[in-house]
């Protein structure tokens, strides 16, 4: 995350220790897959869009703007009338919600004391139309603490495109992460079209990895090319035999026809080689896949990689039929910006 203009020091909030239900899901409120702020009752101290930033919240000592202390999140003014503040956000992809991380990092004497969240499924982003929509509770009123992550599960099986967030009565929320599963990613377009089956916006997700010291494995699935070296998956320098790896679940079962491996920005630290194993998996748990994946058949044999380059493979891909999971191996270690698996949906 870029610091505010002119600032050189900042205190970064620690990441949350995610429970299994969150690790197995996608943050549907990530602007990089299309999430955006729609409307808010008040944004006096800090705009709603900051609450959706996927980067950790920061605190910049001594940073002020025209309205007061600069805060990295959504913060309303002190309410001097009846009622409470609210906001509407659009999810990046419609989906089923399994839980939330309501993060009040750096908000101490100004955090929101409580929050509740409703969801709706709508085609329009018009704020007035959304206010008239039918809203379904997805998170009951929940007490918040200052400078804390609140990881709370959500019941129900509804599909939602927008959320309405209520804070009681006012205050600030640094980040809202909405963990869920993408629904309907492949409902539009030709039935036999070629899709990136592991793209985050198509429901792909990272399942497990042996190391992500310098960059999260989930970055491999983000849209576009990497912004910089921190916007990819990068492991520590390996000082022992073996290689690094990560497991990825496809958004839907499919037959892979093209593979792109992008080492953008990785120059003195790109992997020497890579390979991909794959399988169609039914049942089990994410943990059980780690052992199984060592014995999956090879989808892409070892390929030499180059620094800061896009690598495209097609003829090298083995005919394994429909698959649901892949194991991406890098030899021996290093950084990769993006991985794309282009395929057609299994019939």
Image: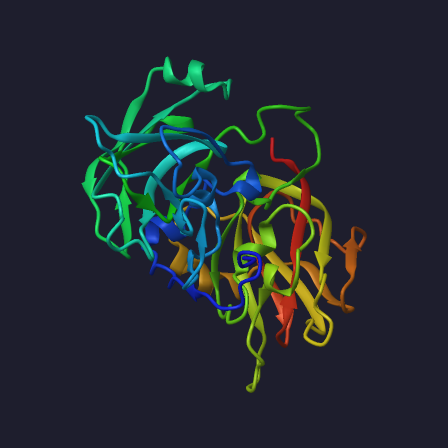
How many marks the image carries: the answer is: 0
**As rendered, which of 259 and 316 lies closer to the eye?**
259
Asked if one can make out residue 247 in the rendered structure from this viewpoint, the answer is no
**Quadrant in the rendering for residue 33:** top right
Say if 15 sits above or below 84 in the image.
Answer: below
**As rendered, which of 221 and 210 lies closer to the eye?**
221
**As rendered, which of 30 and 93 lies closer to the eye?**
30
Residue occupying the far bottom of the picture: 239
Quarter occupied by the C terminus? top right
**As rendered, which of 170 and 319 lies closer to the eye?**
170
**40 lies left or right of 184:** left
Colour mode of the rendering: rainbow
How far from the left and from the top, in percent, is residue 337?
A: 65, 59
How far from the left and from the top, in percent, is residue 182?
A: 48, 36
**Quadrant in the rendering for residue 264:** bottom right
Q: Residue at x 72, y 51 (%)?
A: 259
**215 lies left or right of 106:** right
Q: Residue at x 53, y 66 (%)?
A: 294
How far from the left and from the top, in percent, is residue 26?
A: 45, 45
Say if 51 sits above or below 16 in the image.
Answer: above
Q: Residue at x 66, y 61 (%)?
A: 228
Q: Residue at x 63, y 45 (%)?
A: 223
Asked if one can make out residue 331 in the rendered structure from this viewpoint, the answer is yes
Quarter occupied by the N terminus? bottom right
**Quadrant in the rendering for residue 331:** bottom right
Residue occupying the far right of the picture: 315
How far from the left and from the top, in percent, is residue 339?
A: 65, 54
């Amino acid at each position: 995350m870029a610091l505010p203009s002119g600032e050189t020091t900042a205190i970064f909030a620690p990441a949350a220790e995610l429970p299994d239900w969150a690790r197995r899901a996608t943050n549907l409120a990530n602007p990089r897959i299309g999430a955006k702020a729609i409307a808010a009752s008040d944004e006096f101290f800090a705009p709603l869009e900051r609450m959706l930033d996927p980067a950790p919240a920061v605190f910049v000592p001594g940073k002020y703007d025209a309205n007061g202390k600069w805060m990295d999140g959504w913060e309303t003014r002190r309410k001097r009338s009846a009622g409470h503040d609210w906001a509407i956000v659009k999810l990046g992809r419609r989906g089923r919600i399994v839980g939330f991380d309501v993060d009040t990092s750096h908000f101490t004497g100004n955090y929101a004391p409580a929050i509740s969240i409703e969801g709706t499924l709508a085609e329009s982003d018009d704020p007035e139309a959304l206010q008239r929509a039918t809203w379904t509770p997805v998170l009951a009123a929940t007490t918040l603490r200052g400078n804390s992550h609140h990881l709370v599960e959500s019941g129900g099986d509804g599909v939602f495109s927008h959320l309405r967030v209520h804070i009681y009565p006012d205050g600030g929320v640094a980040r809202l992460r909405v963990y869920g599963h993408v629904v309907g990613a492949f409902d539009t377009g030709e039935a036999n079209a070629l899709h990136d089956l592991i793209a985050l916006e198509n429901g792909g997700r990272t399942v497990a990895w042996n190391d992500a010291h310098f960059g999260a494995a989930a970055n491999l699935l983000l849209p576009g090319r990497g912004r910089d070296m921190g916007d990819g998956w990068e492991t520590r320098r390996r000082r022992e035999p073996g290689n690094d790896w990560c497991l990825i679940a496809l958004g839907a079962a499919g037959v892979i026809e093209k593979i792109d491996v992008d080492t953008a920005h990785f120059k003195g630290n790109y992997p020497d080689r890579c390979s991909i194993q794959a399988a169609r998996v039914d049942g089990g748990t994410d943990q059980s896949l780690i052992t199984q994946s060592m014995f999956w058949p090879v989808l892409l044999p070892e390929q030499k990689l180059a620094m800061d380059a896009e690598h495209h493979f097609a003829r090298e891909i083995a005919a394994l039929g429909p698959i649901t999971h892949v194991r991406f191996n890098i030899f021996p270690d290093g950084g990769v910006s993006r991985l794309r698996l282009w395929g057609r949906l299994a019939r």
